[in-house]
Image (tube, rainbow, N blue to C red):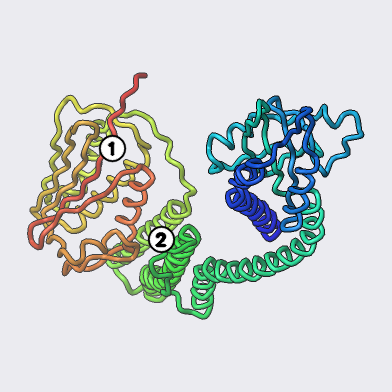
Amino acid sequence: MAGIGYTITSIYFSNQYFYQTTQRLNAGLAEDLIKEKFIDNHPFDSTGNVNKALFGDIMHNMMAVNRAIEIYLLDDKGYVQYSVVLDHNVPDTKQRKIDLAPVHKFINSEGKDYVLGEDPKNLDNRTIFSAAKFNRHGHEGYIYIVLAGKDFLATRSDLLNGYLMHIGLGGSLLTLFFSTLLGILAIWHLTRSLREIIFAAKRFQEGDLKYRIKNADQTDLANVATTYNHMADTILSDIEKIKSIDELRKELIANISHDLRTPLAIIQGYTETLHMKNSELSAEEQENYLRVISSGSERLAKLISQLFEYSKLESNQIQPEKEPFLISELANDIHRNYSILTMKKNIDLKLSMSDDIPLVFADISLVERAIQNLMDNAVKFTPENGEIIVKIETMETQVKIVIQDSGPGIKKENQPLIFERYKQANTGQEKEGAGLGLAIVRKIMDIHDSKITVLSNPNEGTAFSFALPIYGGTF
């Protein structure tokens, strides 16, 4: 299609160029004819008739040189008076009138403008011409010379078919060649980025998980390249998470086995001792053995309960049932419940809050569980004669809860680990439990879109804090 379009366009403008050149070169032909032939001869005889002998001689002489031209004598109105190429025996020959507007335009421009005039043989056709006005012995008119006559057009038509075939074939072949070359270059250029993406995918498939497309946002397929890089990053991140989960699973099994084995071994050992030496043990020793067995059973029950609770939180089986409640009342209840336990260890338990604490919007049972875990942690690590402070503070849009103890504190490098399951900070004291208490607190805060933070220094105690949103509705 491009070749055909090129061929048609080339032929059209070639014709235009040929016609303009021919008309410009022969623009003065009519004027020269008048100056040369009408000096001694007149276009009309003494009777007013056309000097046919003169025009016949002019026509034959000029056609002998150029068979393409045709000469016509027009009166001042544009009617055809005579031409050797017309049959004047036909009645309508003298009725043929040439439009003089193009003639006047041609004469006024002195042949410099490209003007098409009517063909006297076929008034529907437009052709190039040369024209000049004459005035001899009271007779006015125009010499009108068609520069591309019938013989010329017939010959041109015969030659044009071969020319069209050659130029069309040549143009099509050239267009096909260059379009093919352009297509190959375009495809190579467009697929360069695609080849890079395919190469990166193969590298990833072969195990090079860190290979990425360089300057992905500057490639021709920027969206695809950047999407691939993001996808590879996501896959790598998921793989790392899976590895981490697998490591945690192994660690979980090991820790569970250890933590379950210890209380079970204690319970089993003391139970066997009671069976074997029951008659030999005093009442006080039997009571002591039963106390150890009871303590081990409670520890085992607590561990199993924590495991079950953490499992449900981690698998998103627990959905918070949020409601407005007074955090101050919950704090008073916890303070009252833990007072007896802290008195046994001679720990001073304080509650610090104002009287106008607003309602908060959260799951009261989960918040209570989180505070209990933090209190258990504080009681466990606070030494005798120590101090635990529960603070309730009102901020702009939240209520802040702080549990502060006077225990041994936590080193900075250990603080990120304390919220991981089965990770406990090394405080120099004997470890109790499975290390799930703080992990459960963090899970509870996560489902409340809150965050548990720790502020601690060695030998300066530890403070855990979190915030709950203030309830803005009404009952």
Q: Amino acid at mark 2?
A: Asp
Q: Residue furthest bottom?
A: 206
Residue 354, visible in the rendered structure = yes
- State which quadrant residue 243 falls in: bottom left
Depth check: give the residue in front, 143 or 181: 143
Q: Residue at x 58, y 49 (%)?
A: 24
Residue at the spot of label 2: 217
Mark 1 to mark 2 CA distance (whole Å)? 42 Å
Depth check: give the residue in front, 398 or 170: 170
Q: Amino acid at mark 1?
A: Leu
Image quarter hosting the N terminus: bottom right
Depth check: give the residue in front, 96 or 234: 96
Vertical placement of residue 19 versus 259, above or below: above
Q: Which mark is residue 103?
A: none
Residue at the spot of label 1: 468
Q: Residue furthest top?
A: 475
